[in-house]
Image (spheres, grey):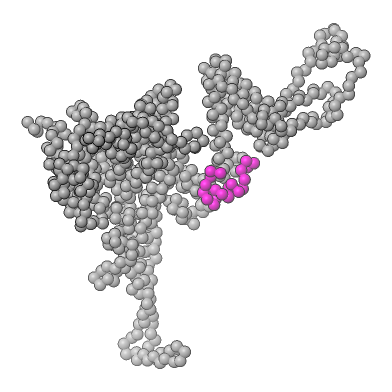
Amino acid sequence: MSKNIYFAAKDSKETANILLEKATDWRNTLTTNGYLEKLKTCWAAYHGAYFSDMGSGHTISFGGEQGELAQLPVNHIRNLAQHMYVMTTSSRPSMEARAANTDYKSTAQVTLANGLLDYYMREKRLERYINKAVELSIVLGAGYVKVEWDATTGKVIEEDEEAGEKIYEGDIKFTNISPFDVVFDVNREDNNHDWVLVRTYKNKFDLAAKYPEFGDEIRELTTKDAKERYSLQIFRKVDSDQVEVWTMYHRKTESMPEGRELVFLTDKITLHDQALPYRRIPVFRMVPNEILGTAFGYSNLFDLLPLQEGINHLYSSIMSNNIAFSTQNLFVKSGSNIDITNLGGGLNIIQGTEKPEPLNLLNTSQETFNFLSILEGKMEQLSGINGVTRGTPDPASNLRSGTSLALVQSMAIQFQSGLQNQYVQLVEDLGVAILEILQDYATAPRVASIIGVNNKQYLVAFKGSDIADINRVIVDVGNPLARTTAGRVQMAEQLMQMKPEEFSIQQYAQVINTGRIDGMLESPIDQSNLIQQENERLTAGTPVKALIIDDHKEHILRHRTILNDIDIRMDDERAKATYDHILEHIGFARSADPAVLTMTNQQPLAPAPVPAPPAPEAGVNNPPQNSEGQSTIGQVLEPLPQGQEEGMPGIPKPATPPAPFNELPTTTVPVPEG
């Protein structure tokens, strides 16, 4: 009868026993197909443990029967892996929450949720755990982050003095897990697991104190150092106090509608057994690629292992030859009666029947060096990390301009797009998990330090219900090319070509010297943000004031897009707010002091033309009239202003600028003579 019951639905003792058997089968399967050994080899290569263990892996060692072989490792794998890692994580991802609705309440919750996501990235060091998962995935094919609610941290919100129990406000806890410590069904062809078994380690004396009912059994458990080694533990202590803690998470399915969380040390020691307290399995994976038809990750570093081994042997061969034969040797034929007489001053006289000849055994064949270069080039080719990315462009390629260097580097970035996409997916999954856990468990008011308007930091009190309408998170990591020095130099060159009057040589030199383009982009970004804020207000029908120093053409081009919405065009109030604001910009562009426009790199507009008087009716003698419609026959006319010819329209009086620019001098644009 027991065989017809799903293992995850059995009692805790039997389920724990089955899970331990599954962990053993998982390890044996991966050992048999060589996957675990590959992970260990890649880990050792990443840390330079060639020819010897980690303790002496960064020295020249000697092998062979008599120590005649010099072993020189040159670790290209770590350098290439670090470039993959930096290209992926160099720019902090920007998480943005989304609400199910667009009403005011949901919009306010989005603002709070975005601040909380930034708070966990910044204050709770979530970024550190994400970056560690990226590094694990590059080196070992997969990296994991576990997200859980820790009910024993934070401030005490309730205390039972009689029972001696305290209730804490709790908080979210993050943990990195290596692929050695996540057991799953090896028969699955994807990562959509029904269950996963996670192994962590904890001090057995802490566990015995926390669970006194199992105190004696816990203290007798076999510790980490005595266990069979299939983990990242390289430096082992013989007196470790850490023991294995196993946690099985089962998602909510038809057979397990409530899911399950089972925490145990052995099949006889169960610490927790309850329904899954989260909406999903709180273990999130990142892999650069997948082994097709399996749930296992695949890293490009796997392909580099044999090439790295070949490079190490070639360098070792060259080093061995140089060490063995760097001291000069002479060849002398037998019976040549060589006699050496030492003279004063260090001179020697050699006498004999044959001339001694030096033995040149130091030369290494050119084919060895050529093949070494080929192997190093193949490592760059397979990893997608070229010489430009590594800072050593090939001199023969004639790559000297910022544009060409940026193009070559963009190819490397494009090659890493799969890793970048997985990185974004991991951040999005973690963002959703954080908000879901806060919605479910942050029942007591709590305080977080978030970034608000104008990057000002302030404290906000919140509860899970304050973000109840948030249902998803999207991530924006920006243009990866803009995170490279070559890409920024290219951007700076294009900006200088497009608008040379707005950018200085000093700003361009700063990009070249520091790789930072913030100084060149600060003003355009601020201007764009201002226009966006104005558009949001104008869309709502709120009047916005223009200033004389605005870039009037840019503002008008961006503001007119508001009227592309037919609903706004049909709304007289909102359409009028936008149209009046555009007319205000036109008025400033036409009447502003030319000095102000020149200093802001704008062209003054010509004055508005005065409408021509109506044409006289045929056959009617129309006497000349003044501006008030009165006949000017017999009147003495005032002379025209200097520089204005008869028949030319008068120049309109400049508009008065709004405060605080109403005290700026305004002048009348003279009309050229003739």
The residue closer to the viewer here, 52 or 207, is 207
Q: Position of residue 34 (x, y in %)?
A: 22, 50
Q: Position of residue 354 (x, y in %)?
A: 37, 88
Query: Left of 3 or right of it: where is 579?
Result: right
Q: Quadrant of the N terminus?
A: top left
Q: Which residues are magenta?
A: 500-519
Quadrant of the snapshot with the C terminus = top right
| Main secondary structure along the magenta-highlighted residues | helix
Q: Position of residue 29 (x, y in %)?
A: 18, 46
- Quadrant of residue 500 within the rendered picture: top right
Nearer to me, 216 or 231: 216
Q: Does the image show residue 109?
A: yes
Q: Is residue 635 above or below residue 362?
A: above
- The residue depicted at 64 percent of the width and 27 percent of the height is 585
Residue 152, quarter of the rendered image = top left
Image position, residue 62 (x, y; %): 29, 68
Is residue 513 part of the magenta span, yes or no?
A: yes
Q: Which residue sits furthest front? A: 162
Instruction: Spot the residue most to the left.
Output: 1
